[in-house]
Amino acid sequence: MMANHSKAPYNARNEEIHEEVTKYRIEVRLLGYAALAFAVLAFFLWPYVLGIIAIILGFVAQRKGEITLGAWSIGLAALAIVLKVFIYPIF
């Protein structure tokens, strides 16, 4: 007796769940890219405001699954704020 290892039969509910998960992943990835964009902009314009926004969005992106984008956003935003506080006043 052989086991049937074919794919699961088509189920409309499975398709809906797959679409919802895909949509969620896209939304979270866009959130991570938005945080990264704010972090990069913080180097050139309003480091305190954009840096804090990037840090908050980075934490949210990390909690929702975009760990790498969130971490880069947090790190770059923190660097922009530190540069503004300690380096820019010297020049």
Image (cartoon, helix red, strand yellow):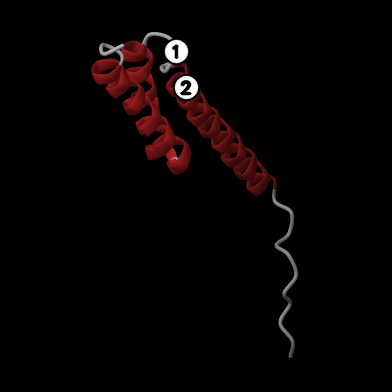
Q: Quadrant of residue 8?
A: bottom right
Give the vertical position of 7 relative to 25 (above or below). below
Quadrant for the C terminus in the image? top left
Task: Name the residue: 32% across, 27% down.
Answer: 78
Q: Nearer the viewer, mark 1 or mark 2?
A: 1
Look at mark 2 in the image and give the residue it sits on. 40
Give the vertical position of 61 relative to 10 (above or below). above
Q: Amino acid at mark 1?
A: Phe
Quick one: 41 or 89, which is closer to the camera?
89
Task: Name the residue: 55% across, 28% down.
Answer: 30
For label 1, the crowd category at 10 Å Cα-Cα, with few meaning under 14, some 14 to 19 and many 20 or more, is few
C-alpha distance separating marks 1 and 2 = 8 Å
Task: Name the residue: 26% across, 11% down.
Answer: 89
Residue 86 in picture, x, y percent from top left: 24, 19
Residue 10 in picture, x, y percent from top left: 74, 54
Quick one: 91 or 1, which is closer to the camera?
91
Q: Quadrant of residue 76?
A: top left
Residue 45 in picture, x, y percent from top left: 42, 9
Q: Are marks 1 and 2 in contact (CB under 8 Å)?
A: yes
- Looking at the rendered structure, which numbered label has been put on residue 44? 1
Give the vertical position of 71 relative to 14 (above or below). above
Residue 73 located left or right of residue 26: left
Quick one: 66 or 12, which is closer to the camera?
66
Q: Element type at marker 2?
A: helix
Q: Amino acid at mark 2?
A: Val
